[in-house]
Image (cartoon, rainbow, N blue to C red):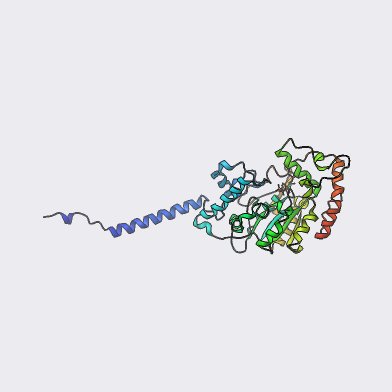
Amino acid sequence: MGCGGCRPRINFGKLLSRASVFITMLLIFTYFFYCLTGFCHSVPTTLGTVNVDYDILDDRRRVLEELRAPAQRNFTADAQQVDVLSANRLDRAGDQGHRIPVSNSFGTKRFPQAIIIGVKKGGTRALLEFLRIHPDVRAFGAEPHFFDRFYDRGLEWYRNLMPRTLDGQITMEKTPSYFVTKEAPGHVCTMNCQTKLIVVVRDPVTRAVSDYTQTLSKNPSLPSFQSLVLKNSTTGLIDTTWSAVRIGLYAKHLENWLQYFPLSHFLFVSGERLVSDPSGEMGRVQDFLGLKRVVSDKHFYFNQTKGFPCLKKPEGSSKPRCLGKSKGRTHPHIPTDILQRLRDFYRPFNHRFYEMTGQNFGWDES
Ligand SMILES: Nc1ncnc2c1ncn2[C@@H]1O[C@H](COP(=O)(O)OS(=O)(=O)O)[C@@H](OP(=O)(O)O)[C@H]1O
């Protein structure tokens, strides 16, 4: 008698279906584990990933990104000089948007509906970080410099840098040099003439000193402020070709923007009030953006050591946080007569700016 009947019959169909159920379960489990560890967050990697001197290292995502890119930890998103290297980083940041997992495809990468266009050293980082607490605001972390430096990369390149947003959320970015770039308003208008424009302005004298302090921190052998600010010491004429001076001619730069955008598209935020009354200034910003007033005084506390308002609970974190060391630097002593000369120089430009904006920022009262 053959023993054919003794051998168990292998049912390949059944085996195959069990195997496929097992593999599917395995995939689902792996996916959920992946999500639980935070890697399928819906926001694409941005330049924020390559920045440690980031003012508010505010969410788990950035920390994770940093861990993933340790070689790039020295890059500062706030660097005023975005060079070719950083352009390539921007490229990579954009490219990564194509490789994000399925769950990251929630939302859409949109062009910013609102941009913080200036001014350098006005308090732009503070404003953006304060806005990021708002659930309806998603912002690109670093400065993309698209409308002043990388415009030839095309609008799609720019859009791809942006975080994904859901309906009702606002996409934002900040690049303070846009305000002083002749071509920037035309470029922004080509993208969308309805874009809302925010300018954080600060006393141009203090702003110039702040700008100088930043350059000095990178180049300690820089000549003195007084030797740079004056054309020559005998005439006492101010050197308007020095960018630290030129940026403070707000009326002049605004005139350029007004050729493309009506005044109603602008919000001028007082850099001084952003420090003395952050919640009050944030109220105005949220109204301007058509947002519910979510960011309020309960989000801020004044840090005595830092000398600035800090966030009680930045987005995605339970710990209070202040901006980084590059914000709120101690300024070098500048002789009073030099500061007075600069103040006199700016006075007519400031008054023109007050007239144009219908706001008196009070810089000439001291
Ligand atoms: N909350 C808070 N914390 C720290 N610093 C604050 C804050 N609010 C406004 N500021 C002021 O912001 C100034 C830097 O401005 P920006 O962020 O626009 O600088 S940059 O153009 O992006 O480099 C920075 O200038 P300096 O004081 O000269 O460092 C600050 O005065």
Which is nearer the eye, 305 or 259?
A: 259
Residue drawn at x 62%, y 46% is: 84
Q: Position of residue 290 (x, y in %)?
A: 69, 63
Which is nearer the eye, 86 or 353?
A: 86
Q: Position of residue 244 (x, y in %)?
A: 77, 46
Residue drawn at x 30%, y 57% is: 15
User: Quadrant of the rendered structure where residue 351 is?
Assistant: bottom right
Return the residue found at the far front: 152
The image shows a total of numbered marks equal to 0
Task: Kindly tell me whether residue 320 is visible in this rendering.
Answer: no
User: Quadrant of the rendered structure where residue 327 is?
Assistant: top right
Which is nearer the eye, 69 or 294?
A: 69
Above-or-below relation of 279 to 304? below
Q: Position of residue 38 (x, y in %)?
A: 53, 51
Return the residue found at the far right: 234
Q: Position of residue 182 (x, y in %)?
A: 73, 55
Return the residue found at the far left: 1
With 157 as the anchor, is 264 left or right in this view? right
| Quadrant location of the N terminus in the rendered image | bottom left
User: Quadrant of the rendered structure where residue 16 is?
Assistant: bottom left
Task: Kindly tell me whether residue 53 is visible in this rendering.
Answer: yes
